[in-house]
Image (cartoon, rainbow, N blue to C red):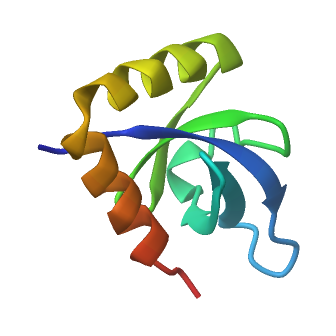
Amino acid sequence: MCLGIPGEVVEVLADRPELARVNVSGVRRAIHIGLLTDDPPVAGDWVLIHVGFALSKIDEEEAAAVLRYLEELGSAYTDEMDALSQSMIE
């Protein structure tokens, strides 16, 4: 199963503006935001993330709803969080 997980943008990396640091349920990782060139995210924005790429911006209410739903899925959510915590974009 492929999931998109909401994350809150903490910062856009100054030296690599195609990357942003996000917080996903306490896990902080750099993700690629290059697909969102029409409306680039800034700190405080929420994005939907899949395999290290921000696919779209979403609002905080939608992010909370998606996180609740994913937590109800159980192992699929846990597996995705495990994959996120092991991923690194340098």
Of 50 and 25, nearer the camera is: 25
Which quarter of the figure has residue 18? bottom right
Report the residue at 80% width, 60% height from top: 12
Report the residue at 19% width, 45% height from top: 2
Q: Position of residue 89 (x, y in %)?
A: 53, 80
Q: Which residue lies furthest to the bottom in this view?
A: 90
63 versus 42 height, above or below = above
Q: Residue furthest left?
A: 1
Q: Quadrant of the C terminus?
A: bottom right
Q: Where is residue 50 in the image (x, y as percent from the top left)?
A: 37, 50
3 versus 11 height, above or below = above
**Left or right relative to 70: residue 75:** left
Which quarter of the figure has residue 11? bottom right
Q: Position of residue 4 (x, y in %)?
A: 36, 39
Q: Where is residue 28 in the image (x, y as percent from the top left)?
A: 66, 63
**Left or right relative to 9: residue 75:** left
**Left or right relative to 73: residue 35:** right
Report the residue at 81% width, 70% height from top: 13
Q: Quadrant of the N terminus?
A: top left
Of 34 and 4, nearer the camera is: 4
Of 58 and 72, nearer the camera is: 72
Which quarter of the figure has residue 69? top left
**Left or right relative to 26: residue 4:** left
Q: How many labels does the image show?
A: 0
73 versus 7 height, above or below = above
